Image (tube, helix red, strand yellow):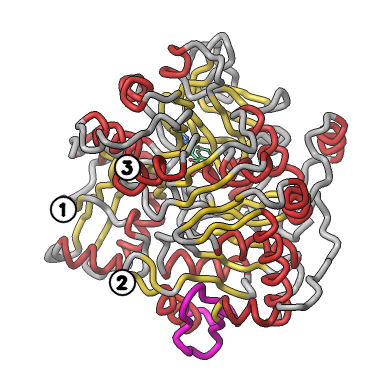
Amino acid sequence: MLAGCTPWPPEFAARYRAAGYWTGETMDAFLRDRARRFAGRTAVVGGAERWTYADLDARADRAAAGLARLGVAPGDRVVVQLPNVPEVFEVVFGLFRLGALPVYALPAHRRAEVAHLCAATEAAALVVADVHAGFDHRDLAERVRAETGGPARVVVVGDAGGRAGFTPLAEVRRLGEGQEPPAPAADPADVAFLQLSGGTTGLPKLIPRTHDDYLYSVRASAEICGLTPDTVYLSALPVVHNFPMSSPGFLGVFHAGGTVVLAPDPSPATCLALIEAHRVTNAAVVPPVALLWLDAVAGGAHADRDLSCLEVLQVGGAKFGAEAARRVPAVLGCRLQQVFGMAEGLVNYTRADDPAETVFTTQGRPISPDDEIRVVGPDGAEVPEGRPGELLTRGPYTIRGYYNAPEHNARAFTPDGFYRTGDLVRRTPTGHLVVEGRAKDQINRGGEKVAPEEVENHLLAHPGVHDAAVVAVPDPYLGERACAYIVPRGAAPGRGELLAFLRERGLAAYKIPDRVEFVAAFPATGVGKTSRRDLRAAVRAAHARPA
Ligand code: J2J
């Protein structure tokens, strides 16, 4: 296994294989096989592009051979930061074919996050768009290289602008044309890619997912969600996020032979038009996007659109309240599926045959009969059914450790291998989970996860900041927003200046606090050494009010 990763104990691996969960298929073999079975069917629609399964397979061949000629080798890590363009699939499957490991960055990430990913994985290459949503990712790549000395190669989807060390994807394809694609023997039990965690610490941790474990979750998800070759799935969220990748996501759709339609942004104007135009049957969104779609349709702005093709709207990533949930069938005329998942593994779905109340009021139940669930109190002992406690889990597709993080792993996992999710849940008699809150240091800003400590560390780098506490404040639309409480050093810096400082440090926009408040001092939190978490709780209790 990739150095720095924690394997499942052999007896668990044997059990998961015997149960038929781990089948020995690699990500690359997965595409080859689906391309054989569904060759002429449409796999991907994005912008003006429409690729069949055979097209995608041929593109993966060329990309793999071209990247190999560029010097990317089996086992290399390659950071991929691309928006919802079909080339994501070409690059990612090209990397799998070559035996290299994609490391996924969100399009919203900026220099701080991308530099961290490149450094933490010692990436051999970085793949970016040229300009996306008005932001020049080539400049970002250039600064990452200047600051960190890596990665050696940058591949640009679009115009590489003639920069030294930058290669346009078109050139990678040309290099790969007519070449035999490399055929390294990947071990299905080994790590296929690294996914970014929501994060609770100063720097986000990386999640190593194996071919075996991930493809099990994909196949099982496709089955639970009833995907078929007739499925047309709209990816409104960035496709490299775990939810639209695997729950059931584009991989689930490819497993079933269906079609993925890429939305460039999640707005109702864009997505409702795509749903009608491509006869979309399934879509996946976070709660604030669901609310936007509901309001747009209920408000009559899209009355002329025929949305009758839409069968299921999946909502997940953050708590979707029962009242909003009830509006989905009433307003959109489709079924709702709640999805409560995590890039570390465990995914829960409400099922098609669940009673309506269960779908409206729970976040679903686990994928696998072998997902082990414990709901525990602060003392670590299991609480009685129906009482809230922290969710611990282990199973055939939940990691046993983060990448290169032994100290953090000692806290994030129990000695017997359960992942401490940090989510407070309650279990119903049917085994469905209701998310009641959180015990972890994280802000869930409408599905986008922010680690207060990470933002505080950046704030503390400002000379005018003596201390900082970033806390969640309730928000009717996003669920939560971030508010930074600052104890200034001397004269308080201006709010605008502080936010510009964070942007200049290369922090993704969603991590920039929505509000900044200056306070003379933080409340005393009792005698002795207090944790940052206690401090945040005290600050919240003393100051926070809804936005
Ligand atoms: C409340 N909190 C939720 C929900 C996730 C499918 C769907 C989502 C993710 C995801 C994912 C929630 N209600 N319905 O990877 O495959 C919060 C929890 C959880 C954390 C994980 C998937 N759905 N959450 O959101 O890794 O706090 O994955 O632990 O980004 O999101 O975040 P992430």
- Looking at the picture, how far across and down is residue 98, in whole percent? 75, 67
Q: Nearer the viewer, mark 1 or mark 2?
A: 2
Find residue 238 and name its label: none
What label does residue 518 carry, if any? 1
Give the residue type at disc 3.
Arg
Q: Is residue 305 above or below residue 75?
A: above
Circle 1: residue type: Phe
In space, the residues marked 1 and 2 are separated at their CA atoms by 21 Å
Magenta stretch: includes residue 148: yes
Residue 277 picture location, percent across and down: 41, 45
Residue annotated with mark 3: 536
Using a 10 Å C-alpha cutoff, classify the residue at mark 2 as few (fewer than 14 neighbours), some (14 to 19) or many (20 or more).
few
Q: Nearer the viewer, residue 267 or 112?
A: 267
Cα distance between the residues tagged 1 and 3: 14 Å
Residue 348 is drawn in which quadrant? Answer: top right
Q: Earlier in the sequence, mark 1 or mark 2?
A: 2
Compared to 291, does 109 lie above or below?
below
Q: Is residue 487 visible?
A: yes
Which of the image's four quarters has the C terminus?
A: top left
Q: Secondary structure at mark 1?
A: strand
Residue density around tag 3, few if under 14, some if 14–19, many if 20 or more, within 10 Å: many
Question: Which dot marks residue 504?
Answer: 2
Q: Secondary structure at mark 2?
A: helix
**Front residue of 75 and 170:** 170
Is 79 above or below relative to 455? below
The answer to whether the residues at label 1 and label 2 have Cβ atoms under 8 Å apart is no
Which label's residue is closer to the chain start, 1 or 3? Answer: 1
Question: For the magenta stretch, what is the residue range?
Answer: 147-167
**Residue type marked 2:** Glu
